[in-house]
Amino acid sequence: MLKIWGRANSANVKKVLWTVEELDLAYERIDAGGAFGVVNEPAYRALNPNGLVPTLEEDGLVLWESNAIVRYLSAKYGPEKFGPAELGARAAADKWMDWTISTLNPVYRDVFWTMVRTPPEVRDMAKVGAGIAATAKALAIAEATLERQPYLSGEACGIGDVPLGCIAYGWFEMAIERPKMPALEAWYHRLTERPAYRNAVMIPLT
Ligand SMILES: N[C@@H](CCC(=O)N[C@@H](CS)C(=O)NCC(=O)O)C(=O)O
C-alpha cells in the first residue's frame, strides 16, 4: 500500500493526497513535519534528506518533491482518469505545476504565512499588500488561460490543476481583498465540487 509521510495541512502534502483521492488509491498517511516533528529523525532523513514533507513510499520506491509524486501517481495509476494522457496535452498541463512553484508560490507564500500563521498583532500588513499585488499579477496569467478552457489541464481536471488548486483554497478563503478574476473563481468553484478536492484540500487553514 502507498505510504505518504506528511501533515495534512501542508499545501505540498495536499497535492499528493488530492491526487490519490482522485485515483481512488488505498494509502496510509503518517503525520510528519511541523508540530509532529519526525522530519529530523535519522530514519526519515534516510528517506528524504531534505527533511521536508511529503515523502512517498511504495514497494521500495522512495520519492520526494510533491510535483514529482503527483506526476508518478498519475502516470502509473490513471493518466486516463487523472491526466492528461496524451503527451502534448500532458506537457501543456504539466507546465502549470512548475509555474506554480516557481512563479506563483514565492510571492503567495508571504500572504499565506502572514495571514494564517502569524498572530494578528505582529502581522506585517505592508508585506501582505505587496504579496497580494504580486500574486494577483501572476494569477492574471492563469485567468487568461481559464477564460479559454475549463481547467489548467485542458477540458478535464488533472495534474496541471493540482498545485494551483491547493493554493487557490487559501487564496479564496483567507480574509483578504482580491481583485476580481471571474474565470479563476469559476474554476475554483468547479474544484470545490470534487469530492477528492474537498477531502484533501478543503480542511481548515492552519
Ligand atoms: N519542493 C518541495 C517542498 C516541500 C516543503 O517545503 N514542504 C514543507 C511543508 S509545505 C515542509 O516540509 N516544511 C517543514 C515541516 O513541515 O516541518 C515539495 O514540493 O515537496
Image (cartoon, rainbow, N blue to C red):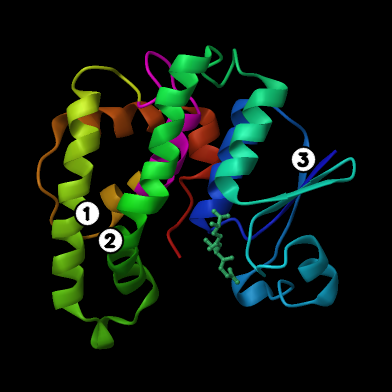
Query: Quadrant of residue 33 in the image?
Result: bottom right
* The N terminus: image quadrant: top right
- Is 32 above or below relative to 87? below
Give the mark count: 3
Mark 3 CB in 8 Å range of ligand 1? no
The image quadrant of residue 22 is: top right
Which residue ends up furthest to the left in the rendered image?
179
Q: Nearer the viewer, residue 178 or 50?
A: 50
Q: Is residue 169 above or below residue 129?
A: above
Q: Given the image, on which type of amino acid does mark 2 rest?
A: Val
- Mark 1 vs mark 3: in front: 1
Q: Does 206 sit left or right of 54 as displayed? A: left
Q: Read off the residue under disc 3.
A: 27
For the C terminus, the image quarter is: bottom left
Taking the spot 61% from the left edge, 42% from the top edge, the residue there is 68
Residue assigned mark 1: 135
Horizontal side of residue 26 vs 108, given as left or right: right
Sequence-first disc among 1 and 3: 3
Q: Given the current orientation, which residue lies at the most extreme bottom position?
A: 122
